[in-house]
């Protein structure tokens, strides 16, 4: 198996065979070479000659073991494929690996070198110098370098598969047609983070991001989704790890001055390292961190967090993975010592904290032997927490192998005569589908992205002061939208080791019965709570409007519900209705008793002298007056409303007409006894009946016109009381009502005038003074009725009208008939013709 590695720091090529480092082999015809671009150093800087001030070549600093781990994962996959008899039988995969050193410029440079196959070799004597065309490129780790590489190699259609470049911008196939990745796009992660923030009720948060494609695009999607979910950002700041300290300190000041307690950090692990250092300097604790997969499951970050600033952090990580045999392969570093590369020398010295003799600068430096044992080493290289990312590298290499397997029509052997074309390889990879030995499904959608699935992890402190990454939920985009975010029933630890979910809002929620009013010049999450106006309500929390209750409803004192108003009307069940009903029935019975007495003594002089026919008609009309008051009690209906007013008007006109007839009879009777007067012939029984009929007929006509033009109707009065509906009878036409009432008043006034004129006639015969007194009561009652009726609310206006009817009826009954009943029952000696027609004693 031939493996070729080319590391770009020293721009040299080195050949080695992992099983036999002493016998390197050249690239043979038929071998297929993969390019790997990883960052073995986490930063870089420009150098200058101190004497000439001329720029020198770029120098990498701060060796990063992650790059070695990613490269080892690639080598593991390649060796496993080359040892397989099922995948690419007879075909060897070689590789060229470059150190991009975290630099976009270096990434583009090495990409072009891989595409052109014109690597500059520092050692011409190196035996492994046969050029080979790279069929696919694995990497880069970060999004911005990957975007730069994809832009450069896109026109050549050389497939590029990244294991950790998550920027959603890379899904644009018009810009990056040959880019694929085995890690989900940040489009899904950003939306998932926004939903996670919303799930815990945090509507007022701060945001920190890396100032590159990864951070800027990820935070843009998060901000857009957050706004849709009602989440506001108090601040959104960006920085890059190479920024001057003044800029980072300014960010610290912004965070210290903020009121939000939740920080959403869309950062790479290198930028999080810088920010965490500044937080430690200022001893800023107590913030609830929400992290992206760029740092949230990074054990190195957890190790350097000595001040427990990130305790309780929650965020999204790539699901845990295990690839059998990979750990052992990656920790087998002895073959690396066979290389003459300066990079491997640097790696070995950093791994075992020693120095080879030719590099020893101080007496205190420990001497490297080249045979150190890895068993006693505990550092980031031996940390396998990034196994999910190693698995992504592994799957990317296998995706290329499966595509080549299909292109070369491999069965037991492969067709070596097929001319490999990068565009064909790209097409095959885009349509690939297979399962790894761990049963992981590998495929790409139309944007070159894998299915998005994340674990929700929570930083929970352990006894050794290092946080434990506890899986507390899952976010799966393959599920329906409502079920994508699922939290397990586990105890979560929050900032400051609290078990209570922290609160981070600009304004507390507005309770039901209030509405939100935005604070001027502030985001929509900052508002005041205003109590709903009278008659309005809001029955939900954080309502933006108060709705007016329907007319049949009213809002309670808290304005949090519309309560159906109580229908109020004068009913028989309530005390007032019962008393008025009893009074009406008592008046009816009393009238009936008087009628029986008059009927019993109908042949006596007293009854005969007082016009018995009109007396019985008057008693009948009084009975109707008492009974018509009952129509005013009970729930108003269309028929009851029309009946109560018309019955009242007609019966009272009939009653007053009878009284008026009796008054005229009394007056005419004394006028007829004067010499030369024969008036009674014009006012005999027939004329009396016709007068009563005529007066009553006029009222009937008025009522018919009223009912025809605009009759009374049942009406629900919502305005009188806020918590009650007054069921009453609307007048329909007020003119009709006042015409009926005015006509009754007119007859009553006429009756009063005639009775007043006859008041001084002989006492024994004359009942005019009783009629006068009864008319005084009648008129006083109805004159008082008018203002009382107008000013009385609801059912009390009905009670006033009933009271007026009963009072005036009792006034007529008592004043006109009770004195006669007294004589008939208790003073029968006065009930004689002589006494009736006798003259009273002179005064």
Image (tube, rainbow, N blue to C red):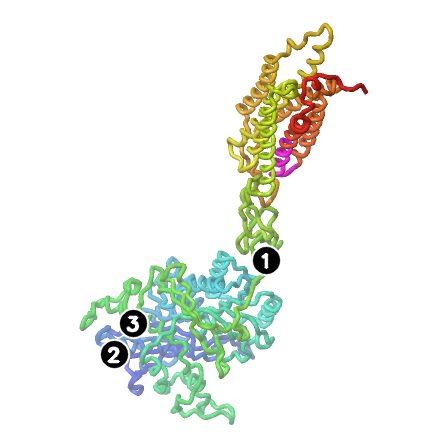
Which residue is at the front of the view, 842 or 362?
842
| Of the image marks 2 and 3, the number of the one nearer the N terminus | 2
Residue 778 found in image quarter: top right
For discs 1 and 2, the disc positioned in front in the rendered view: 1
Q: Which residue is mark 2?
A: 83
Dot 1: element: loop
Circles 1, 2 touching at the beta carbon (< 8 Å): no
Residue toward you, 379 or 762 = 762
Instruction: Tell whether 575 sits left or right of 168.
Output: right
Residue 60 % position (x, y): 47, 77
Q: Which residues are magenta?
A: 792-805
Q: Is residue 550 above or below residue 233?
A: above
* Farthest-out residue, bottom: 363
Residue 334: x, y in percent? 36, 87
What residue is rendered at 53% in x and 63% in y? 202
* Mark 1 or 3, nearer chain start: 3
Q: Residue 526 got which mark?
A: 1
Q: Position of residue 114 (x, y in %)?
A: 36, 71
Which residue corresponds to the image point at 42% horizontal and 79% vertical from the top-left?
A: 10
Q: Point out residue 227 in the picture as x, y percentages from the top left corner.
A: 51, 57
Instruction: For mark 2, give the secondary structure.
Output: loop
The quadrant in which residue 579 appears is: top right
Q: Nearer the viewer, residue 110 or 620?
A: 620
Upstream in the sequence, badge 1 or badge 2?
A: 2
Q: Which mark is residue 439?
A: 3
Residue 801 magenta-drawn? yes
CA–CA distance in space, label 2 to label 3: 20 Å
Which quarter shows the N terminus?
Answer: bottom left
How far apart are the two marked residues, 1 and 2, measured between alpha carbons?
A: 63 Å
């Amino acid at each position: 198996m031939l493996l070729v590695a080319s590391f770009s720091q020293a721009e040299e090529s080195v050949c080695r065979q992992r099983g036999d480092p002493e016998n390197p082999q050249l690239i043979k015809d038929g071998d297929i070479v993969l390019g790997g671009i990883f960052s073995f150093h986490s930063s870089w800087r420009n150098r200058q000659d101190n004497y000439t001030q001329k720029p020198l070549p770029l120098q990498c600093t701060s060796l990063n073991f992650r790059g070695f781990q990613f490269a080892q994962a690639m080598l593991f996959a390649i060796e496993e494929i080359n040892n397989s008899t099922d995948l690419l039988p007879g075909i060897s995969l070689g590789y060229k690996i470059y150190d991009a050193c975290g630099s976009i410029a270096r990434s583009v440079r090495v990409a072009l070198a891989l595409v052109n196959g014109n690597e500059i070799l520092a050692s011409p004597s190196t035996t492994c110098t046969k050029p080979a065309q790279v069929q696919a490129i694995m990497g880069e780790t970060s999004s911005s370098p990957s975007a730069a590489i994809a832009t450069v190699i896109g026109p050549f259609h050389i497939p590029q598969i990244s294991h950790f470049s998550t920027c959603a911008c890379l899904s644009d196939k018009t810009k990056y047609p040959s880019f694929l990745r085995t890690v989900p796009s940040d489009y899904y992660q950003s939306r998932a983070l926004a939903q996670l923030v919303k799930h815990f009720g945090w509507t007022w948060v701060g945001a920190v991001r890396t100032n590159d494609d990864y951070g800027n695009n990820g935070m843009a999607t998060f901000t857009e989704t957050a706004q849709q979910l009602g989440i506001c950002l108090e601040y959104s700041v960006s920085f890059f790890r190479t920024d001057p300290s003044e800029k980072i300190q300014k960010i610290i000041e912004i965070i210290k001055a903020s009121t939000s307690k939740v920080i959403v950090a869309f950062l790479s692990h290198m930028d999080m390292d810088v920010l965490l250092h500044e937080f430690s300097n200022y001893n800023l604790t107590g913030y609830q961190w929400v992290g992206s997969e760029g740092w949230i499951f990074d054990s190195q970050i957890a190790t350097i967090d000595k001040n427990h600033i990130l305790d309780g952090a929650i965020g999204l990580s790539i699901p845990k993975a295990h690839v059998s045999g990979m750990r052992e392969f990656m920790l087998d570093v002895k073959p690396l010592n066979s290389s003459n590369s300066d990079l491997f020398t640097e790696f070995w010295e950093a791994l075992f904290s020693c120095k080879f003799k030719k590099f020893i600068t101080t007496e205190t430096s420990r001497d490297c032997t080249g045979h150190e044992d890895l068993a006693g080493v505990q550092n980031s290289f031996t940390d396998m927490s990034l196994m999910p990312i190693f698995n992504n590298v592994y799957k990317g290499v296998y995706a290329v192998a499966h595509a080549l397997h299909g292109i070369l029509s491999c069965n037991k052997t492969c067709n070596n005569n097929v001319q490999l074309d990068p565009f064909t390889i790209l097409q095959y990879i885009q349509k690939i589908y297979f399962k790894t030995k761990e049963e992981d499904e590998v495929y790409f959608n139309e944007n070159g992205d894998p299915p998005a699935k994340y674990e929700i992890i929570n930083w929970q402190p352990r006894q050794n002061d290092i946080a434990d990454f506890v899986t507390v939920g899952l976010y799966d985009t393959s599920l329906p939208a409502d079920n994508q975010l699922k939290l397990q029933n586990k105890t979560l630890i929050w900032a400051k080791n609290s078990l209570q979910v922290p609160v981070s809002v600009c304004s507390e929620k507005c309770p039901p019965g209030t509405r939100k009013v935005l604070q001027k010049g502030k985001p929509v999450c900052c508002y005041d709570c205003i109590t709903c106006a009278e008659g309005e309500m809001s029955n939900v929390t954080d309502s933006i409007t108060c709705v007016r209750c329907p007319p049949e409803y009213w809002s309670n004192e808290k304005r949090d519900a519309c309560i159906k108003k109580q229908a109020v009307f004068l009913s028989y069940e309530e005390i007032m209705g019962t008393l008025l009903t009893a009074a009406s029935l008592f008046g009816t019975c009393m009238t009936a008793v008087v009628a029986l007495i008059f009927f019993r003594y109908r042949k006596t002089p007293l009854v005969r002298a007082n016009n018995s026919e009109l007396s019985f008609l008057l008693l009948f009309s009084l009975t109707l007056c008492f009974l018509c008051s009952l129509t005013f009690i009970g729930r108003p209906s269309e028929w009851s409303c029309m009946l109560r007013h018309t019955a009242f008007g007609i019966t009272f006109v009939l009653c007053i007409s009878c009284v008026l007839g009796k008054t005229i009879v009394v007056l005419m009777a004394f006028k007829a006894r004067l010499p030369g007067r024969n008036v009674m012939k014009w006012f005999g029984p027939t004329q009396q009946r016709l007068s009563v009929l005529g007066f009553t007929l006029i009222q009937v006509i008025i009522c018919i016109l009223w009912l025809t033009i605009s009759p009374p109707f049942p009406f629900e009065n919502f305005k009188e009381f806020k918590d009650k509906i007054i069921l009453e009878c609307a007048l329909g036409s007020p003119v009709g009502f006042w015409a009926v009432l005015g006509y009754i008043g007119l007859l009553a006034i006429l009756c009063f005038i005639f009775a007043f004129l006859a008041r001084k006639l002989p006492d024994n015969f004359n009942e005019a003074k009783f009629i006068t007194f009864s008319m005084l009561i009648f008129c006083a009652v109805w004159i008082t009725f008018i203002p009382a009726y107008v000013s009385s609310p609801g059912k009390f206006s009905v009670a006033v009208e009933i009271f007026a009817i009963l009072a005036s009826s009792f006034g007529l009954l008592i004043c006109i008939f009770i004195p006669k009943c007294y004589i008939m029952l208790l003073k029968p000696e006065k009930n004689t013709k002589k006494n009736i027609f006798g003259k009273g004693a002179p005064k």
